[in-house]
Amino acid sequence: MTPAPGIRLDNTIFTGDRESSTKTSLVKGTATPGNKDYVCVSGSFTAEVCKVKVVTSKPRCFTFRLRTTGEKVRRCGLMMAQKAEHRVSYPGDSGGPVYQHTKNGLIRAVGTIVGGYESRANTPFPEHDIVYYRPIEDVLRHQNAELQICGPADICD
C-alpha cells in the first residue's frame, strides 16, 4: 500500500478509553484467534473493550438489518465475537481495529470491525453484545497491502 504524498503510515493503533485516546500501542504482527479465544476491539465511539470472546471458528456469512434503511443485507467472510453484559460496539465503530495484546505490551492485529448489535431478549445471544469483524488477512488481501513489522527505532520502507 503506497500512501498519498505527504501521508505517513505507521504501525500503531489507539488503545485505552475515550478519555485517554492519545495512548497508542505498537502493532507487531497478526493473529488468528480461534473459537473461545479473546480479543479487544476499539472504535471511535466505544473506545477499547477487551475480553471479547470469539464464537466462530472460521469466517462465515451473517445477515444484518441496516440501521439507516432497515434493509436486510448478507455479508460473508466475517467472524463473530461477544461479551456478556457489556456494549461491544456502537454505530460509527466500523473500521476500528480488532486485536490481541501480547504479554510484552505489543499488539497483534486480528481484523477490523464491520458491525454489531446490542443484546436484547429476542436475539440469538440474549445477554451478550455481538461484534462482527473481517479477519486481518482478508483486509490486507483486499487492499493489496501487507503489514510492516518494525519498531520505533526501525525504518520501514
Image (cartoon, grey):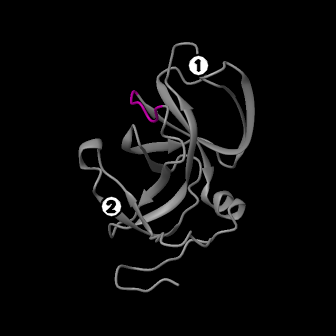
Q: Which residue is mark 2?
A: 24
Q: Which residue is mark 1?
A: 123
Quick one: 59 or 147, which is closer to the camera? 147
Q: Name the chief secondary structure element in magenta.
A: loop
Measured as percent of width and height from the top left, residue 51 is found at 40, 45
Q: Secondary structure at mark 1?
A: loop
Amino acid type, label 1? Thr
Q: Is residue 94 magenta?
A: no
Q: Secondary structure at mark 2?
A: strand
Measured as percent of width and height from the top left, residue 69 is found at 66, 20
Question: Which comes sooner in the sequence, label 2 or label 1?
Answer: 2
Q: Residues within 10 Å of mark 2 (few under 14, many from 20)?
A: some
Up-down: is 147 above or below 54?
below
The structure residue drawn at horizontal position 53% and vertical position 76%, both measured from the top left corner, is 148
Q: Residues within 10 Å of mark 1 (few under 14, many from 20)?
A: few
Amino acid type, label 2? Thr
Q: Give the magenta range.
A: 85-90
Q: Are marks 2 and 1 in contact (CB under 8 Å)?
A: no
Quick one: 3 or 103, which is closer to the camera? 3
Q: Is residue 47 left or right of residue 38?
A: left
